[in-house]
Image (spheres, rainbow, N blue to C red):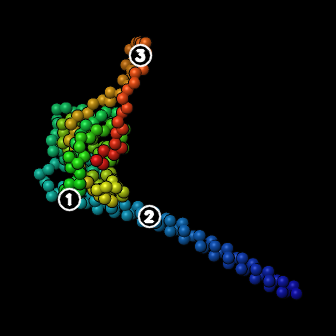
């Protein structure tokens, strides 16, 4: 009788041990698969960036008469018209007025200047393409600059949901007509200047402000 009980207990213990072992083994591939997926995703993105940069470098090599400049942000540019006398550049809060033409990497027009119309951009205060956000701050008034943007600083995986597709490198030509300080911004106080108190003026109704487009690329 005791032998029978011992056999039953031994069998139950063996079943329980095997069940736990199988459960533990079943959980391992999940983390391994997750780590493998992340590594493959990173490798795929690196390969995509490298391929796009290779295409851009071939374009640059095929145009030896044009002087291209590489930037720290990972895009390239050249000057169609350069202003070497007025060295001021747009800063955060300025209002930039510019025209824009967008082409694919083969030079085919996606959006013409006529399609997009005159652009108004509050520097670093509006959500626009990352490459343009950085590139405009490098320009001087009345300059025309052509930028070559890899997709990761253009519209990336999602495109613009209109004409710009997935992982698409872009050639953007920007004409910076002018930029001015935002008149609505409060002037900074001058150190040592006496503060004066003025009588508040009556509040008068103002016209509603027309909201600016979130993304100036999209017409």
Dot 2 falls on a residue whose secondary structure is helix
Q: Secondary structure at mark 3?
A: loop
Residue identifier under label 2: 39
**Left or right: where 177 falls relative to 37:** left
Outermost residue toward the left?
A: 65
* Gap between marks 3 and 1 measured at Cα: 58 Å
From the top left corner, tell me how far across and down residue 105 is, in percent. Answer: 23, 57
On the image, which quarter does residue 104 sit in?
A: bottom left
Callout 1 environment at 10 Å: few (<14), some (14 to 19), or many (20+)? Answer: few
Cα separation, mark 2 vs mark 3, equals 63 Å
Residue nearer the viewer, 105 or 205: 205
Q: Nearer the viewer, residue 201 or 190?
A: 201
Residue in view at x 37 percent, y 64 percent = 44
Count of numbered circles in the view: 3
Q: Residue 201: which disc? A: 3
Chain-order first, disc 3 or disc 1:
1
Q: Which mark is residue 106?
A: 1
Of the numbered discs 1 and 2, the one sitting upstream in the chain is 2
Image position, residue 102 (x, y; %): 23, 51
In x, y percent, where is residue 88? 24, 32
Residue 199 x/y as whole percent: 43, 12
**Label placed on residue 196:** none
Q: Label 3 neighbourhood size at 10 Å, few (<14), some (14-19), many (20+)?
A: few
Marks 2 and 3, the one that precedes in the sequence: 2
């Amino acid at each position: 009788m005791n032998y029978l009980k011992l056999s039953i207990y031994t069998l139950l213990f063996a079943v329980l041990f095997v069940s736990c072992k199988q459960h533990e083994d079943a959980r391992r591939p999940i983390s391994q698969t997750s780590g493998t997926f992340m590594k493959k995703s990173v490798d795929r993105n690196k390969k995509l960036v490298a391929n796009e940069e290779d295409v851009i470098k071939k374009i640059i090599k095929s145009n030896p008469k044009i002087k291209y400049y590489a930037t720290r942000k990972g895009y390239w540019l050249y000057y169609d018209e350069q202003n070497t006398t007025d060295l001021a550049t747009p800063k955060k809060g300025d209002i930039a007025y510019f025209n824009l033409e967008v082409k694919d990497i083969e030079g085919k027009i996606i959006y013409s200047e006529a399609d997009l119309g005159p652009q108004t951009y509050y520097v670093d205060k509006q959500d626009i393409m990352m490459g343009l956000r950085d590139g405009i701050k490098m320009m001087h008034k009345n300059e025309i600059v052509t930028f070559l943007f890899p997709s990761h600083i253009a519209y990336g995986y999602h495109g613009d949901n209109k004409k710009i597709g997935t992982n698409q490198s872009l050639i953007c030509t920007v004409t910076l007509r002018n930029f001015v300080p935002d008149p609505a911004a409060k002037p900074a106080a001058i150190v040592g200047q006496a503060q004066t108190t003025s009588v508040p003026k009556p509040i008068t109704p103002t016209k509603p402000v027309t909201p600016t487009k979130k993304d100036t690329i999209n017409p």
